[in-house]
Image: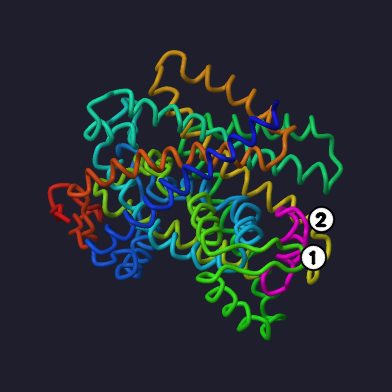
Amino acid sequence: MLTAFIEQLDVLENVLWTYFGVPIVMLLGLYLSIKSNFFQIRHLPTVFKTFIGFLRVRKTNDECGVHPLKAFFAAVGGCVGIGNIVGICTAVQLGGPGALFWIWITALAGMILKYSEVYLGLRHRVPNGKGGYNGGPMYFLTRVFKQTWVPQLVCLLLCVYGVEVYQFSVITTSVTTNLGFNSYVVIAILLGLVIFAGSGGVCRVGNISSKSLPIFVFIYVGMGAWVLLNNLSALPGVFQEVFVSAFTGHAAFGGFAGAGLIATMSHGIRRGCYTGDIGVGYASVIHSESSVQVPEKQAALAVFDIFLDTFIVCTTSLFLILATGIWHEPIEAGMLVQMALGEYFPYMHFFMPLFLFMLGYNTINAYFCVGLKCAEHLSPRWGRPGYYAYAVVALLVFSFMGTAQAQTVMAIAGVSLLIINGIGIFFLRHEISFNLAVPETKKGEPALSDVSFEQI
């Protein structure tokens, strides 16, 4: 009976992505890109400068909200996660090398979508009376849907999405399999660490991510670069495979079952959306807590978020398994990158669980923090205790189920959020400003009165 139910969930996921999720990402992303004169490409250098500029910002005690980079790292912690190493590899396993091309296209569309959702969250946020702000899709969607149940539904879906059962399952499986630790001990420790981080809000989650993520990115990308340098002769063939099979599909060989053009596009786009958390709205909730007063400045960091996530970390993962030829081996996606790195670095069965723990822990923290805020929004009195109970039960149950089932649940919640938020972004498109050239005050902080919202 459970197997039949899981199969029905798989069917529902495919229907939602094929007929709603993929068209929304591609069409809305293209529309916003054209109307903004491809803001995400033209202003990418300015986005980098904005990030560097925030490194010099010192938040004072009397300012409302958290430091802009703490909000950024809290959000990017939920974006750069296990999906960049494990989940993203399933796109190539199911759709072939051409899926990487569509992942890149999704990232370009996702940059402008994520910018828009973060911008709207910041523009419609409200002070929460605790020295911070509350914002996100449940606030800006009230301007689109007169039915109050729609924003409440988004809040509920974010609560479901906030308990990251997939990455929790991957971590516990990886640690117990590679290191031989007792699964109950691993689950208990990880649960305690997640509750500790998430209960501290965006500030604590941002502190943890800002200290661990840069280390991971530096080490992982460095190791990947070394492997690719040792496979330089294979890279021209990899590029050819990526671009050719993106428009033709890929024939079956080895452990790869083959994929047609539609399957290649679909798996590339949906996995690109999942790893970048495009249209989900969780980033809008987190970035809304920033002390920055001009939405454009903070929303620009969402573009950098996707760039780091897709074009750096995800591309490194997929080039690793494509250049080494491991991608078509009939093994679980979670082992592909480990095997590719294991050919050049020793003790990967120790290092990979550490990598996955570091990434997954940051992601779970970010989602859990957002889930708590959404639960409080739904019920100020019972939201937090009820969410703690739900999180413990859900994470325990999915720890003993396959990672594929957990990923299906997350994908359905994610695409449902994408559909609703995509509609909201489209109807509020005339409120979105893509003007990063905002004058600064003497203190170095943009002034709200200086903002001129451009109609698109």
Q: x, y (%) of residue 173?
A: 76, 42
Residue identified by numbered label 1: 342
The residue lying toward the viewer, choosing from 380 and 343, is: 343
Give the prevailing secondary structure in the magenta stretch: helix
In the image, residue 102 sits, relative to residue 421, either above or below, namely below
Q: Which mark is residue 262?
A: none
Q: Residue furthest right?
A: 180
Image quarter hosting the C terminus = bottom left
Determine whether, in the image, residue 200 is placed left or right of residue 119.
right
At which x and y percent is residue 127?
28, 30
Residue at 43% in and 42% down: 280
* Gap between marks 2 and 1 measured at Cα: 8 Å
Q: Residue 51 versus residue 137: which sits nearer the camera?
A: 137
Q: In this rendering, is residue 371 above or below 74?
A: above
Give x and y (percent) for residue 260: 57, 63
Q: Position of residue 31 (x, y in %)?
A: 27, 58
Q: Residue drawn 68% across and 86% down? A: 233
Visible in this render: residue 222? Answer: no
Asked whether residue 327 is drawn in magenta, I would say yes
Badge 2 vs badge 1, beta-carbon distance below 8 Å:
yes
**Residue 176 shown left or right of residue 41 in the figure:** right
What span is in magenta?
Answer: 320-341
User: Eyeballing the image, is 433 above or below 67?
Assistant: below
Please say whether residue 364 is visible from this viewpoint.
yes
Give left or right: position of 345 versus 92. right
Determine whether 120 is above or below 260 in the image: above
Within the magenta stretch, is there residue 181? no
Between 368 and 441, the residue placed more toward the observer is 368
Label drawn at residue 349: 2
Query: Label 1's element?
Result: helix
Q: Amino acid at mark 1?
A: Gly
